[in-house]
Image (tube, rainbow, N blue to C red):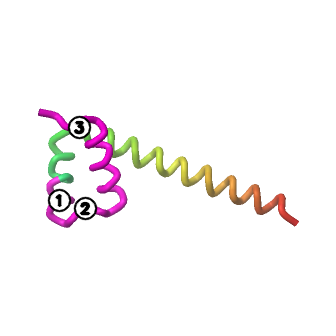
Amino acid sequence: MAEPAEELDLMIEEYLEGRMAPAERAQFEDRMKQDPELRNRVNSTTRSVELLEQALHEGADRQADLCP
């Protein structure tokens, strides 16, 4: 039985933030190797985070340029 989307999202968040125990992380990585849908969700989430961080950084740079 598949996990609910919210539970899977939480697991992805914990994985990406490095909050999984080593054994749990290894198990999750093994699961990603076997599950292309999970791997795609992790990759998509990673890219979304990168884009948000980039936008925040660029916004902060523009804000700094506007301040005397």
What residue is drawn where x is 88% and y is 66%? Answer: 68
Q: At 58% across and 53% down in the image, what residue appears?
A: 54
Measured from the top left, where is residue 48 in percent x and y? 47, 44
**SS of the residue at dot 2?**
loop
Gap between marks 2 and 3 measured at Cα: 21 Å
Instruction: Please check the rendered image and state whether residue 47 is part of the magenta-colored stretch, yes or no.
Output: no
Q: Position of residue 23 (x, y in %)?
A: 14, 63
- Label 3: which residue? 36
Magenta span covers which residues? Answer: 1-27
Q: Who's the residue at 15% across and 42% down the image?
A: 34
Residue carrying label 1: 24
Q: Is residue 18 left or right of residue 24?
A: right
- For the point 21% across and 46% down, the residue is 32
Label 3, label 1: how far apart the Cα atoms are: 19 Å
Residue 15 in the magenta stretch? The answer is yes
Check disc 2 and report the residue beneath it: 20
The tag earlier along the polypeptide, 3 or 1, is 1
Q: Nearer the viewer, residue 17 or 42?
A: 17
Q: Position of residue 56 (x, y in %)?
A: 62, 53
